[in-house]
Image (spheres, helix red, strand yellow):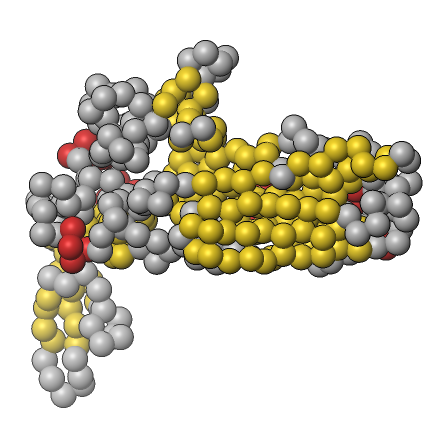
C-alpha cells in the first residue's frame, strides 16, 4: 500500500510540494535542479562545508560546480553525477602524437565517495594497457588490457577484452588516477586504431561501439565522461547522529535511519503514503473510502446501508454483518435497503 524511496534530506513540512528546496532558495543552476540538502545560496544547504555548491554564472547556461567538477545531475537517492576528462595515448606514423593522464580527488573528510556500484573503470583500444590507482579512502591498483588484430574481431556493445575492457572499483574510493599506454605504439593496428582511451564512467551511460576505435572516435583528449559520486548525510552513524536532535535529519515519524553502505554518513528511508481513495484503487463496495497511513478504510454511506447475510453452516442460523466481503471464503448474500 505504500512505496519506499530514499531521501537524504531533512524532511520538511513542505516536502509534498513540487519543490525539493528550502523556501526562498533557488532550485536550479542552469539546466540542473539543486534539491535540498544541497544549495547554492547562504542558508540553503544542510551545511556550508560539503553541500554548498557554486553556480558559475559566467557560462551560458550557468554551470553547477562541486569544487572544480561540473555537476550535471543530483538525485535524492544519494548520488550526483559530475563530468571528468579521459586519459589517452595516441600515435601516428611518426610515433607519439599525444598522451594525457587524469585524476579526480574528493576531500578526505567529505561524505562523498566514488560510486562502486555505478562506475566502471573502462579502457578502449586494440593495443591497450590501462591502470587505475587510488590513494585516498581506499588504496588500490587495478586495471585491464585490451588487444585485437583487426576491427572485424570486435563486437558492438561488448566490453570483454577485445577492443574494450572493464573492471570495477572498490567501495570507499575518494581519489583515483588513470593511466593508459600502448605496448607497441599502436604500430600493428594504426590503420584502424591509432589511440587508446581509459576512464572511470557511469556504466549506465556507456555503450561501446566499434567506431570508438577509429580516427573519428567520439573519445579524444577533450571528451568529458560522467562519473557518479555517492553522497550521504554527515560523517557518523545513525546512532551517533541521533544524539544531536538539532542536526539529525531523519525527523519525520515515518522516517527510518540506516547507515550508508558505501562510505561515511547515513540515509533516511521514508514511507510515503499513497492515497488509494484519490488513486481510485480502493474497494469499498458502495461505501465511502477514507485514506489512512499505508492503507485505507471504508465507511458506510448515509444514503445506503448494505446488509450482508452469511450462512456459516447448514446447522447454524444466518448471521448478518456489516463486513464488506466474504467470510472464510463463503459467498455473501447481500440485501440493500434504501
297 w.r.t. 57: above or below: below
Residue 158 x, y percent position in the rendering: 72, 54
Task: Tell me if I can see residue 133 in this picture.
Answer: yes
Tell me which corner region of the image, top left, top right, bottom left or bottom right, holds residue 48: top left
Q: Is residue 165 shown above or below 8?
A: below
Name which residue lies at 45% across and 40% down: 105
Q: For the point 19% across and 31% down, which residue is it?
A: 14
Q: Nearer the viewer, residue 104 or 152?
A: 104
Looking at the image, residue 68 lies above or below residue 187: above
Figure quadrant of the N terminus? bottom left
Q: Position of residue 55 (x, y in %)?
A: 38, 20
Q: At 31% across and 44% down in the image, what residue appears?
A: 109
| Residue in the foreground of this view, choosing between 115 and 130 | 130
Q: Is residue 294 visible?
A: no
Q: Position of residue 117 (x, y in %)?
A: 48, 54
Whole-percent x, y for residue 337 in the image = 12, 53
Q: Residue at x 46, y 46 (%)?
A: 175
Task: Determine the image quadrant of residue 141.
Answer: bottom right
Amino acid at each position: 500500500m505504500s512505496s519506499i524511496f530514499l531521501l537524504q534530506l531533512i524532511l520538511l513540512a513542505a516536502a509534498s510540494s513540487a519543490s525539493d528546496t528550502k523556501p526562498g532558495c533557488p532550485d536550479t543552476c542552469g539546466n540542473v535542479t539543486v534539491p535540498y540538502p544541497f544549495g547554492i545560496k547562504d542558508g540553503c544547504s544542510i551545511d556550508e562545508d560539503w553541500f554548498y555548491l557554486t553556480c558559475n554564472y559566467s557560462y551560458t547556461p550557468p554551470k553547477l560546480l562541486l569544487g572544480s567538477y561540473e555537476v550535471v545531475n543530483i538525485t535524492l537517492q544519494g548520488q550526483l553525477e559530475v563530468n571528468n576528462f579521459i586519459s589517452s595515448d595516441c600515435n601516428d606514423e611518426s610515433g607519439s602524437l599525444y598522451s594525457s593522464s587524469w585524476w579526480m580527488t574528493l576531500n578526505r573528510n567529505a561524505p562523498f565517495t566514488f560510486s562502486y556500484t555505478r562506475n566502471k573503470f573502462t579502457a578502449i583500444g586494440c593495443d591497450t594497457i590501462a591502470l587505475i590507482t587510488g590513494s585516498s579512502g581506499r588504496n588500490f591498483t587495478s586495471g585491464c588490457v585490451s588487444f585485437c588484430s583487426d576491427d572485424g574481431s570486435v563486437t558492438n556493445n561488448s566490453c570483454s577484452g577485445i577492443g574494450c575492457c572493464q573492471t570495477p572499483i572498490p567501495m570507499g574510493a575518494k581519489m583515483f588516477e588513470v593511466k593508459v599506454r600502448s605496448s607497441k605504439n599502436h604500430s600493428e593496428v594504426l590503420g584502424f586504431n591509432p589511440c587508446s582511451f581509459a576512464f572511470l564512467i557511469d556504466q549506465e551511460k556507456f555503450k561501446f561501439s566499434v567506431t570508438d576505435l577509429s580516427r573519428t572516435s567520439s573519445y579524444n583528449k577533450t571528451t568529458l565522461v560522467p562519473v557518479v559520486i555517492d553522497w550521504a548525510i554527515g560523517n557518523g552513524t545513525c546512532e551517533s547522529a541521533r544524539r544531536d536532535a538539532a542536526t539529525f535529519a531523519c525527523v519525520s515519524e515515518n522516517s527510518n535511519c540506516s547507515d550508508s553502505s558505501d562510505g561515511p554518513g547515513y540515509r533516511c528511508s521514508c514511507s510515503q503514503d499513497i492515497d488509494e481513495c484519490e488513486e481510485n484503487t480502493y474497494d469499498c463496495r458502495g461505501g465511502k473510502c477514507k485514506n489512512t497511513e499505508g492503507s485505507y478504510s471504508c465507511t458506510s454511506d448515509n444514503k445506503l446501508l448494505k446488509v450482508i447475510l452469511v450462512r456459516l453452516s447448514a446447522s447454524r442460523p444466518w448471521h448478518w454483518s456489516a463486513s464488506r466481503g466474504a467470510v472464510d471464503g463463503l459467498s455473501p448474500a447481500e440485501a440493500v435497503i434504501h
